[in-house]
Every structure is written in structure tokens, then in C-alpha cells.
Amino acid sequence: MITLQSRLERARERLAGHGQEHVLRHAEGLDPVRLDRLLDQVDALSLEQVGTLAAALHDDGGFVLPADLAPATIVRRSPDDAAWTAHGEALLRAGKVACFMVAGGQGTRLGWDAPKGTFPATPILRAPLFRVFAEQIHAARRRYGAMIRWYIMTSPMNDAPTRAFFAEHGHFGLGADTVMFFPQGTLPSLTMDGKLLLAEPDEIAVNPDGHGGSLRALRHAGALDDMRAHGIEHISYFQVDNPLVHAVDPRFIGVHAAHPGSSGEMTSKMVAKRDAAEKVGVFCASAGRTMVVEYSDLPASLAAERDGAGRLRFDAGSIAIHMLSRAFVERLTDHGLALPLHKARKKVPFIGDDGRRVEPATPNAIKMETFVFDAIPMAQSSLVVETDRAEEFAPIKNADGDDSPATSMAAQSARAARWLEAAGWSIPRTVDGAPDCTIELSPLSASCEAECTGLAPRAVERGAACAVHPLSPG
């Protein structure tokens, strides 16, 4: 029988072999339950990976701007869209497409002490973000007569409350067996000299491994196996904070799967940057491959360059919406996932030698994460599809100012007004052209402009709040 003491000695010996024995400095003072918890963490820890991470701390190469950097190839709106849309619709009807949402965040920056997906995001009914996407998927299932499964990556912190929220709301009518949850992975936070930190005497300090870890999480959670078992070939990737995203977009799916310039492995959406200084990554090309250059790595002189039509040359802003093939993710994760590590110096609270919690005043540790867009150059060929910001990008990130609930709700209302107006509705407008009313349009009523033609036209009163939802009175 293996005792706690024997496990402790074995862990101590293993850690000492990698210069990390300090992790057990408080072990003798822990009760059996807490000691068992700490030893479980140590047993699960890949010390070889820790060594790799520690070595990466001293790699100061950073990003090197390619000499041949050029704007990425962009698929603009064209007469071919009908063909791409038809191809995407065929894949949807055949059950070949699934949705994958990254939802590991908390609503802390919004003053919301719960998973961000539970945040009330719509302008009138205040539907939570999770419901917004659930209704899109429900509507798409109905429209295409096929099952569209939903995979949701949580975080270790919000996994349990996310599952509970879905259970409380009956999985929004989608069926519990068609929604799969799994937490993202973590990476240990390290001191500047590569040492592990203790968040508590019985807990090693870790941080989420970034949205790039979502691909590895699909593998480890068995989601890729589940997709294969259900005949799913393509994955619609999006993040939880953008209620305008088209979670199921047949044109995007069709371009991804059938465009001659695409390998069908990874395709992305972009919006034109508001201005040269907007803090979004930019789609570029180098050595025949598409890539994203972070705004902080793009020289101001290049960011400000304009073409003959006066448009920014590097205007393709990344908005974290992608299509990936299941086979591509399987290939990337067959032997781990070698995405580049991005380092950030952070203030990480830790347990000191005396057993007391230390709140550092300056950055004391390195947190590492991976970014999903770093997989784009690994595709044989990858395209970037243009979409309109007003149509599909109004994230909720900040409590106020840009990308806040107020700006997102205004954008949701403006899009609904535009769609309904095109279908013959009378929408009051202010002198500057903005809707002089608030409109909320549920995907269950219409999930694109074309579907609004099925709604009986009406006149919306000035200053009114109009919720177009099959479950709303009036």
C-alpha cells in the first residue's frame, strides 16, 4: 500500500531532480487532505514541460518582422458568394459542421462575478451571451434540418458554474447530449528564474494556456473523437464575448471548404480596421503563408501605409472568428501542439518561505500562453474572408467606453434595425441616421437579413423598445 509519506518522498526526489523541490517546503504542515491534493498536482505535473518553459524564459528573440511582409489575400464580397453559400449549406444539411466556442473567461472586468457567458448582453431582454449563441444554433438546426453539435471550452475556474447554468436553463432547448463542455489546459506560472510558485501551501500557481490551447483541449477532452463519430468535418470557432458573430455562416463555411485558394484547413474572418492605431492583430502574408501580426509588432510606418485608393494597406483586423477542419486539428495535436509561447510579465501572488501570502508590487513572474491564430501559417494555404464590422463585430470586453455592453447593445440594435428596414419595416431615425428606437431581434425570429422578409412589416414608434422574439408578447 502506497502511503502519503512514501508519495511525499517520491515527489520530493522527483522535484529535486529538476530543481523544483521548494514546492514541498510547506508539505509537512499540511493535513492529509491538503497534502494529498498537492501531491496529485505534483504527480500530474510534466517537469520536462516545466523545464522547456523555463528555458523559453531566456529566449529573447521575440518577433522578427519578415522582410517580405505583405497584406494577406482577402476574399471580398463577390458574385461567387451564392456558390460558396450553397456549398456551405450543403455541408450543414449533411451534418458536417459543428460550433466551437471559447468561453473560459470570467466577467470580472464587467463587474460580473460569474462566467462571462452568463452576462446579460442583449439590448432589451438582457439575454445572456450563452442564450444568444444557443438561439443561433437552434435556428440553424431548424433551417438546415440537421444536427449542429456545440462544443464549449470553459476554464478550470468557470467549468462547474457554466455547466450548472446550462442545466438550470435546460440547455436552452438544444439537448444536453448535443452540448459538450471541457476545461482548457493550464501552464505553470514561473518566476523570472524559472521556478514554480505556490498560489497556496497546497496549490501550485498556474494560468490558462490561452485560446491556442483550445486545439489541444479538443484532443484531450475527446471532442475530436466525438466529432469523428458524428461525421463532423468542419469546426466553426468563435469566442463568447461577441454577440454579433454568425456562429453558423454558410458563406464562410463554403469559402473555407471549397474556394480554390483554400486548403480547407483554416480560414479566418476580418474587418477593416477603424484606423491605423486600432489595437487588433492584422492578417498579413509572408513566404506564401497567411499569418497574424500583433498590433504591437507592426511598425507604425507600415500600419499607416495606404494604397492607391486611400485604404490602409494592412487593414485586415483579426476578430477571432475561424473555420478549421477536424483533420487539421487532429494533425496539429497528434504529437502535442507546438504553437509559439507568448510571454507576459505579471504580478502573481504567492506563498513565501514563511508560509504567508505575498502580494507583489511589481511583476515577479512570467505567465505563458498560446494563441490560436498562430496555427494559421501551419495550414497549407489559408484565406481571410472580409465581413462588415457593423454586421459581425461588437465584443463585450470593458465595463464602459469602447467594446462595452453599451456599445455592443447599440450595435445589436442598429443591425436589427438595418435588417428589418430592408424587409419593409418603418424605423425612426435620428438626424445623424442612427435608429431612434431600440430593437432586439432574436435568431429564432431571423438570423440574417434575408430571413427578415418572413416577418410582417410594421412601423416602430420613435423612442420605442421593440423585442422581436417568438417568446416575447407583442
Image: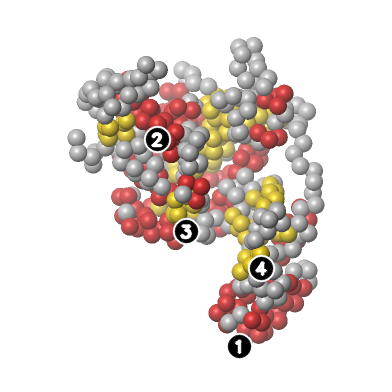
Front disc: 4 or 1: 4
List the residue tagged with mark 3.
159
List the residue tagged with mark 2.
409
List the residue tagged with mark 1.
1
Q: Give the percent coordinates (x, y) of residue 296.
A: 68, 35
Q: Residue at x 72, y 29 (%)?
A: 299
Q: Are marks 4 and 1 in contact (CB under 8 Å)?
A: no
Mark 3 and mark 2: Cα distance apart in space: 26 Å
Mark 4 and mark 1: Cα distance apart in space: 32 Å
Front disc: 4 or 3: 4
Secondary structure under tag 1 reads loop
Mark 4 and mark 3: Cα distance apart in space: 26 Å
- Left or right placement of residue 379 versus residue 433 in this view: right
Q: Are marks 4 and 3 in contact (CB under 8 Å)?
A: no
Q: Give the quarter of the figure containing the N terminus.
A: bottom right
Number of other residues with Cα within 10 Å of mark 2, as a class: few under 14, some 14 to 19, many 20 or more: many
Q: Residue furthest top?
A: 308
Q: Residue furthest bottom?
A: 1
Mark 3 and mark 1: Cα distance apart in space: 34 Å
* Mark sitting on residue 351: 4
